[in-house]
Amino acid sequence: MTEAWGPDDDEPRPHSGPVRVRVPAKINLHLGVGPLRPDGYHELNTVYHAISLFDEITARHGDTLTLTMEGEGTGELALDETNLIIRAARALAARARVPAYARLHLRKSIPLAGGLAGGSADAAATLIACDLLWGLGLGRDELADVGAQLGSDVPFLLYGGTALGTGHGEAVSPILARPTTWHWVVAIADGGLSTPAVYRELDTLRDSSWPPAPLDSADRLMAALRQRDPEVLAAALGNDLQPAALALRPQLADVLKAGTEAGALTGLVSGSGPTCVFLAATAAHAQEIAGRLTAAGVCRAAVTARGPQPGARVI
Ligand code: C5P
């Protein structure tokens, strides 16, 4: 007997739910910031790197769109229409012309406003979760297109790994390097920093040192990645936003100093801060640095992380 094989059998179908998606935090190994563009963004040359700090979104069917949360920042994060998770679900539903009905739950570990793209990570996870829950079957590239309108870092967090980001960060090309695990220590600060405020501070600092530096290419960093030597990578890490983050939060200089005194190969502010990240030679070295940083009392918490990690994916 031949099996009936309907024409729709390859079509994606709604998932009965729940759908659980895990998404990593990002750091920038290189963050070259160009001048302010007329649209309010700065042109970037950045190297994104996904690390093992994760948020998790669970999506279930519902007859409206709701969001609940637990973990880091509970009570501080608005769970209304301004939330990037709600905006991601609505943007995806509008693109696919389906009703935005889901019960979403966020388990948060990535600190809020920390320079680790926690908000963008949650938006990326929501796109993956709702795409599957609603049976839309959009590819990652199409989801990245929706995500780019939500935040500059959202497309990267759909892909993960280590990738070059251009435009205002939304144009992502994976960097194909032989697999190497890098060991990091992440120093989490008390309180966040506003990304627009840090970019504005950079513009102010640059106005007083006209002409501005040209947009720095990521070539040196990419060459360092290929050498797979942490000492070489340490010498190539850089962040144009660091002076602005330090101007707004001078205590970060103490965190960076404490990290290098604890034995890190180097340290830098992550994205727009205030999280600082330190490169270690090995997993054991990272543990040791995290212990010393915790004992130094310069940050709320110091944890180890590994990169690269895959982007938002169903677990
Ligand atoms: O894209 P995202 O929502 O994360 O950006 C937040 C803010 O950070 C922007 O509104 C802008 O003020 C600033 N930004 C920028 N240049 C970029 C990325 C972000 O000035 N390339």
Image: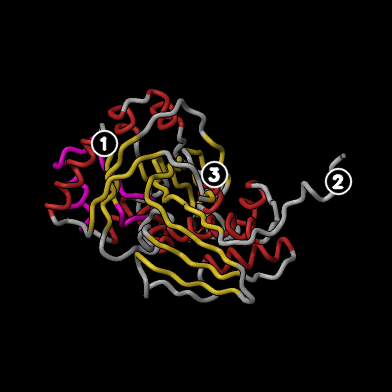
Query: How many angstroms separate mark 3 from mark 2 (CA)?
Result: 37 Å
Three-letter residue code for mark 1: Ala
Three-letter residue code for mark 3: Tyr
Whether residue 280 appears in magenta in the rendering, the answer is no
| Residue 135 position in % (x across, y down) | 69, 57
Which residue lies under the disc numbered 1?
283
Task: Specify few, some or many for label 1: CA neighbours under 10 Å numbering under 14, 14-19, or 20 or more.
Answer: some
Question: Does dot 3 land on a helix, a strand or a loop?
Answer: helix
From the viewer's side, name the closer residue of 278 and 133: 133
Query: Which residue is pictured at 52% across the width and 43% down the height?
Result: 165
Which mark is first along the chain, 2 or 3? 2
| Residue 161 position in % (x across, y down) | 47, 39
Total labels drawn: 3
| Residue 134 position in % (x across, y down) | 67, 61
**The N terminus - image quarter:** top right
Does 7 sit above or below residue 68? Answer: above
Does 162 sit above or below residue 64? Answer: above
Question: Magenta residues?
Answer: 250-275
Which residue lies under the disc numbered 2?
4
Query: How many angstroms separate mark 1 from mark 3 (CA)?
Result: 25 Å
- Is 25 displayed left or right of 137 in the figure? left
Residue 301 can be seen in this image: yes
Which residue lies under the disc numbered 3?
159
